[in-house]
Amino acid sequence: MITPELQQEYFEALLCKKTEYEGIFYVGVKTTGVFCRPTCPARKPKFENCEFFKTAKEALIASFRPCLRCRPLSHPGQVSPLVQMLVNAVEENSEKRWKDMDFRALSIDASTARRQFKKRFGMTFVEYARARRMGIAMKQIRDGESVINAQIASGYESGSGFRDAFSRIMGTAPGLLKEENALKTAWIDTPLGPMIAIADDNGLYLLEFADRRGLELEIERLRQKTKSAIVPGTTKPIDSIKKELDQYFKGTLQEFKTPLILFGSPFQRQVWDELKKIPFGQTVAYITLAIAIHKPSAFRAVANANGANQFAIVIPCHRVINANGDLGGYGGGIARKQWLLDHEKRK
């Protein structure tokens, strides 16, 4: 049952196209007969013409048809066929340096590719392809290849051009490359919106909702702390967390096994360890968490440590609420927090 208060909240989220409400509700528009996701770019209906649903299935049963613009039956932010085609093209021919004529040969508008990649990855397609080339060059050098061979494999005829491009993206010259200088990043589509994962071959460094406030600064701090370039790609930990998240949202997984690389003070690590002990489907209060780590007066510091958690869902800070039963804060948005708690309680 969606209360009148929730209906008003959802309508405000619809007007403002709030991404943190993705997957939380769907809106049926009585005048058109279609149903949309909260961030649909179409013209907004009047409140009296809206009918709100918690699932796409409910909207379908109510005889609404899916909107062709926002495609509510797919994951929000899901990669478009054009983006997927170009990503595959980069993987098949990583040394290729793309020009407008290459887009025309594929019947693709270069500006459309630029816009869609900017929305998806925060960089244009040309920047993505260049970063991917440099990431592959980095791996080759780390595996013992000479700098000149990596340069040629990356499609650079000029040694100085290769060094300049490499240094600009990786933060160091290719000849000074060290083992720890590479982290890979990938987007993961989920029912609640896309998430960003960052990892190396050993473990996951970050997992956050892509629209989390301050995420760019968080990633920059991680880059500086690890003295690493962060480039598009995948690793075994990224593949692992993708599979585990898919199982989690399907309701078949309660405990994550993907290895995590944790940065934080001893106090923060103590809080995060305690968070992982909260049983699936249950909640605890901040004060209870403080008592559990034998620091009952430090509940505000516990709340701050919760906010510093860089592994959404995996380290379940969403299971911590206020002593009076209110949800409290959550970096991914209160609506998502409520959805996650409801999801876990259903299992």
Image: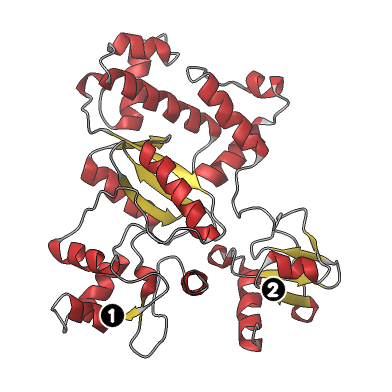
What quarter of the picture does the N terminus occupy?
bottom right
Residue 302 placement (x, y as % from top left): 23, 74
Residue 89 placement (x, y as % from top left): 58, 24
Question: Seen from this angle, which residue lies furthest bottom?
Answer: 324
Which residue is identified by label 2? 53
Q: Nearer the viewer, residue 245 or 27?
A: 245
Q: Nearer the viewer, residue 53 or 19?
A: 53
Mark 2 to mark 1: distance in Å? 32 Å
Q: How is the image coloured?
A: secondary structure
Query: Which amino acid lies under the numbered mark 1 shown in the image of this protein?
Result: Tyr
Residue 158 placement (x, y as % from top left): 38, 10
Which residue is identified by label 1? 286
Q: Do we see residue 210 in this rendering?
A: no
**Which one is earlier in the sequence, the residue at label 2 or at label 1?**
2
Q: Nearer the viewer, residue 32 or 325?
A: 325
Residue that appears at 66% across and 88% down: 4
Residue that appears at 30% across and 47% down: 259
